[in-house]
Amino acid sequence: MEKIRINRQKNEVRLCFNERFYPKKYIDMAVDDFGEACNIKESKGCLVLKPKGKEDISIIGYEFYNYVLGLVKNH
């Protein structure tokens, strides 16, 4: 099951992926592509995204999920 947790105080979003549906190679591709917009680190099997600019963290979290899904569907 996918999870998204938004922490507005820290201005970050934690994303957890079910690798049965989102293979790691596509998650890694998305991390590379989002690297300009966010600082991304892995923590306890999830990703933590922290925007570099003033982007809305809830939007970035869902955009990241959608981007990974698009990569999965197109490959």
Image (cartoon, rainbow, N blue to C red):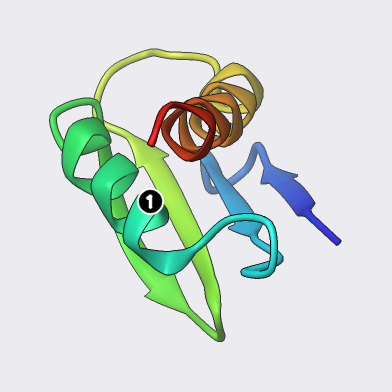
Residue at image x 29%, y 57%? 28
Residue found at the far right of this picture: 1
Residue at image x 48%, y 62%? 47
Residue found at the far front of this picture: 75
Image quadrant in which the C terminus is located: top left
Q: Position of residue 33 (x, y in %)?
A: 20, 33
Q: Nearer the viewer, residue 36 or 30?
A: 30
Q: Amino acid at mark 1?
A: Tyr
Determine whether 63 is above or below 7 in the image.
above
Q: Position of residue 1 (x, y in %)?
A: 86, 61
Q: Position of 17 compared to 39: left or right?
A: right
Q: How many marks?
A: 1
Q: Position of 75 compared to 67: left or right?
A: left
Residue at image x 65%, y 61%? 17
Determine whether 71 is above or below 22 in the image.
above
Q: Position of residue 55 (x, y in %)?
A: 43, 14
The image quadrant of residue 6 is top right
Q: Position of residue 40 (x, y in %)?
A: 31, 54
Q: Nearer the viewer, residue 52 or 46?
A: 46
Determine whether 56 is above or below 73 in the image.
above
Q: Position of 30 compared to 1: left or right?
A: left
Q: Position of 9 compared to 6: left or right?
A: left
Badge 1 is on which residue?
Answer: 26
Question: Badge 1: how crowded within 10 Å, few (<14), some, or many (20+)?
Answer: some
As helix, strand or loop, the secondary structure at mark 1 comes to helix
Residue at image x 43%, y 47%? 49
